[in-house]
Image (cartoon, rainbow, N blue to C red):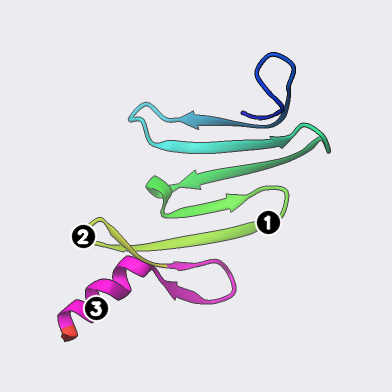
């Protein structure tokens, strides 16, 4: 939760809730902006390698090698992660 003000007199402005499968892998997230009443629901598939936000139809695909995420495609193109770039630079040095 995110609060506005202090704990005694403040109000909750945002909240997040999460859902998990039997193995402890996150399968969903719901973000709610209390002030505007807007909600964003994100669903995770294939161990988090694919996610979609229901309200905006946004899709993100994550690509991993040996368990390390090396790139993400958010619909605007494929982008490498900062860690993958660091590894590549270290190998070329």
Depicted 72 relative to depicted 78: above or below: above
Among all residues in the image, which is located at the extreme right? 36
The residue depicted at 23 percent of the width and 72 percent of the height is 87
Q: Name the residue that disc number 3 marks.
A: 88
Question: Where does the image place residue 79, in percent across and percent down from the top left?
Answer: 45, 74
Write the start and end of the magenta stretch as one range. Answer: 72-91
Question: Does 81 sit left or right of 40 as displayed?
Answer: left
Q: Nearer the viewer, residue 35 or 68?
A: 35
Q: Name the residue that disc number 1 marks.
A: 57
Q: Name the residue that disc number 2 marks.
A: 66
Nearer-N-terminus badge (3/2): 2
At label 1, counting other C-alpha atoms closer than 10 Å, the crowd grade (few under 14, some 14-19, many 20 or more) is few
Nearer-N-terminus badge (3/1): 1
Q: Report if the CB atoms under discs 3 and 1 are less than 8 Å apart.
A: no
Real-space Cα separation, disc 1 to disc 2, in angstroms: 29 Å
The verdict on residue 82 being magenta is yes
Q: Nearer the viewer, residue 19 or 84?
A: 84
The residue depicted at 73 percent of the width and 22 percent of the height is 10
Question: Where does the image place residue 31, in percent across and percent down from the top left?
Answer: 65, 38
At label 2, counting other C-alpha atoms closer than 10 Å, the crowd grade (few under 14, some 14-19, many 20 or more) is few
Q: Nearer the viewer, residue 76 or 89?
A: 89
């Amino acid at each position: 939760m995110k609060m506005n003000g202090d704990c005694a007199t403040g109000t909750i402005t945002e909240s997040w809730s999460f859902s998990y499968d039997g193995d402890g892998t996150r399968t969903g997230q719901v973000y709610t902006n209390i002030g505007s009443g807007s909600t964003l629901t994100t669903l995770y598939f294939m161990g988090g390698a694919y996610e979609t936000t229901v309200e905006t139809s946004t899709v993100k695909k994550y690509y991993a090698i040996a368990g390390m995420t090396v790139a993400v495609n958010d619909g605007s193109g494929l982008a490498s992660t900062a860690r993958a770039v660091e590894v590549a630079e270290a190998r070329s040095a």
